[in-house]
Amino acid sequence: MLGEAISFVRRNLSFVCVVVAANCALVAFDDYSGGNKSNSAQFFVALSFGFFIQNAILNGEGKVSNLTSGMRGFGGYIWKNLLIMLVVIGIGIGVPVAFGATSLSKNVFLLLCLAMIAIILPLLLALVGTWPIAGIAGSKSGLSAAFSRGKRGLVPTFLRLFAGLFLPFIGGLLLMTAATSMSYEPDSIFSDGKLNLIALAILVICQWASIFGLCYVSIVLARKLLSSAAPRPIGGRQGNAVAATSVSEIFE
């Protein structure tokens, strides 16, 4: 699926560049204004990006062409993903609080919460991540059907989602740490009213890595839905049962 993600980015390079530029602009605006007002906008951009990717995969086109058409299931896709994120955040914060982690220092508490989210998010997406996508395909299947799909191949799906979601994040942290060790200021795009080119370059690289990871995650979940909807080949339990019945009938 990594090769498919690379191929998808190549075929939709202009679309991906627009998304990266939009995210960079939102981050730069926050840095310039000294706030965090664009977090919700970035989250919406990420969800919309995932929607269009999965829509293209499920339609068999593999290319994002017309953004105004093919919006079936967009509303349900957004609120279902929001619900999943709220559950992840609730568990990620609630579990450390329940075990008394609030008595620890602030940095340790935040680290524990991030560690919990890093485990819960890909796990929950692996289990029910096809629930929001089913609406794109016109299916009205609920959480139980998504859970049944998610149980099959849970471990490899979890590992792929974990890699797509958090390896770009870890890589970005390492890049910023390396820049800091060389006396650069990678966390401030505007320094003394001037554009910090090093910070801007790091931002673009991190956004590209993040968007590629999101593309990979979206493809993994879309392929999960497609493979679950495909008919199973003969030779499984049902196939063996049919064969056994036929043989027994012959010898009766």
Image (cartoon, rainbow, N blue to C red):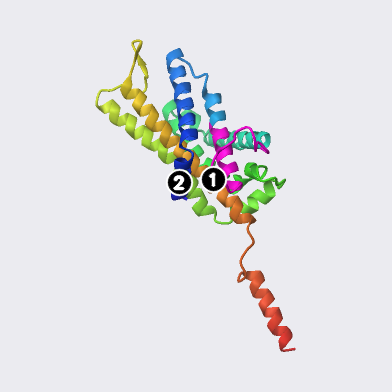
- Please state the horizontal and vertical placement of residue 101, each as a whole percent of the image: 49, 32
Mark 1 highlights which residue? 62
List the residue tagged with mark 2.
7
- Residue 152 in the image: state x and y as whole percent: 58, 56
| Residue range highlighted in magenta | 46-73
Left or right of 86, for residue 156: left
Against 3, is 180 above or below?
above
* Residue displayed at 63% across by 43% down: 133
How many labels sit on residues? 2
Please, is residue 95 above or below residue 247 in the view? above
* Amino acid at dot 1: Gly
Tell me the kind of residue under disc 2: Ser
Whichever of callouts 1 and 2 sits on the residue coming sooner in the sequence is 2
Q: Position of residue 177 (x, y in %)?
A: 31, 30
Residue in front for this viewpoint, 205 or 38 = 205
Residue 136: percent from left, percent from top = 65, 42
Instruction: Looking at the picture, tell me which residue is in the foreground, 105 or 58.
Output: 58
Position of 72 compared to 4: left or right? right
- Place residue 212 in its image quadrant: top left
Q: Please say if the residues under marks 1 and 2 sit with CB atoms less than 8 Å apart.
A: yes
Distance, label 1 to label 2, CA atoms, is 9 Å
Q: Residue 249: in sight, yes or no?
A: yes
Q: Which residue is more in the foreground, 4 or 142?
A: 4
Q: Residues within 10 Å of mark 1 (few under 14, many from 20)?
A: some
